[in-house]
Amino acid sequence: MKTRYLVLSAVALVIFVGLLLIFVVRKTIIINIDDEQREITTQALTVSGALRQAQIPLHPEDSVSLNLNQMLRDGDTITIERASQIHILDDGESYIFMSAERSPANLLTSLDISIYPDDRVVVNGLSYNPESILPYLPTHSIQIIRATPISVSLKGDQLKFNTSVATLGQALWKNGIHLYTKDNIEPAINTLLDKPLEAKIQPSREIEIQEFDREIIERTSASNVGQALTDIGLPLQGLDYSTPHEDEALPSDGKIQLVRVKEEVIVETSPIPTEIQYQPASDVAIDNQQLIQPGEIGLTAQRIRIRYEND
């Protein structure tokens, strides 16, 4: 009887200790992963045990905020930064590796890649501040676009700057050089900046053209009056003329008088009256007249040229 009592007591003690262990070991923790938060209850003793129980596999390059062998406590927070495949392209050099680092600046520093003020960092096709933090993605592509030296000749001045934008037009705009449509620029504004470049800008100016009874205000980068008129779609034709003359430089006040000229030729006729001529005739009796040759009505014609200026 006593033996049976001891056995039952031992069993009860084991059950009590087991329940006590379950109560003590059981804990609630928070896991932050892929920008999501999970709250789980676990009996695991260590961080790695809790992650296994939660069926969260780890890549060797993943970053875990707590040591995997650390003993868990109720209320602990485990933050996991998943490793992404990083592809970095710089000056024709390509680097591919796995990393949980989310800062482009730190990723570049790890490869001893320096970034200069005018360089541009493009992440997944978009310009990015290298000091900012990237969101988690399985793959990140980072490209370093090095600045290109540009020299621009404008109104006698030589402007020099470095830029990492794609085209000449974007570089001019970014550096405060705004163009009009009629400005003349060489090379074209869509020229790609893949090497050092020298550009020349001939700025346009505003001119006022008086044609018939209308005023036309336009811009042109032409050097003389004739070229300016052609540039804005009002070329001189035939007998047209301008003031100043088409070969002269654009006037300082920008005002040009355009005169449209046309001519037509008309012919005017008037009859020539017949004349009567009398002459003696030996075979005609005295005091008699005889028609020897009838006269013909004649015409006088004159050609007249009429010149119209502005109708």
Image (cartoon, rainbow, N blue to C red):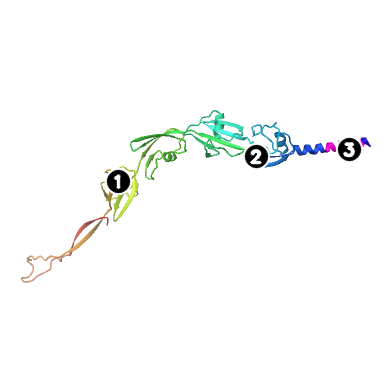
Residue receiving disc 2: 32
The answer to whether residue 66 is left or right of residue 112 is right
Residue receiving disc 3: 8
The answer to whether residue 209 is left or right of residue 119 is left
Q: Which mark is residue 179?
A: none
How far apart are the alpha carbons under marks 3 and 1?
A: 119 Å
Kind of residue indicated by mark 1: Gly
Which x, y percent locates residue 154? 35, 38
What range is drawn magenta here? 3-15
Density class for disc 2 (Cα within 10 Å; few <14, some 14-19, many ≥20) is some
Label 3, secondary structure: give it: helix
**Residues at circles 1 and 2 in contact by the CB criterion of under 8 Å:** no
Nearest to the eye among marks 1 and 2: give it. 2
Residue receiving disc 1: 226
Q: Earlier in the sequence, mark 3 or mark 1?
A: 3
Nearest to the eye among marks 2 and 3: give it. 3
Density class for disc 3 (Cα within 10 Å; few <14, some 14-19, many ≥20) is few
Kind of residue indicated by mark 2: Asn
Which x, y percent locates residue 168? 43, 38
Q: Choose between 303 and 224: the one closer to the eye.
A: 224
- Say which residue appears at 45% left-offset and 33% top-offset: 148
- Say which residue appears at 89% left-offset and 38% top-offset: 8
Q: Residue furthest left?
A: 286
Which x, y percent locates residue 48? 70, 34
Kind of residue indicated by mark 3: Leu
Q: Please state, as top left, top right, bottom left or bottom right, where the N terminus lies in the image.
A: top right
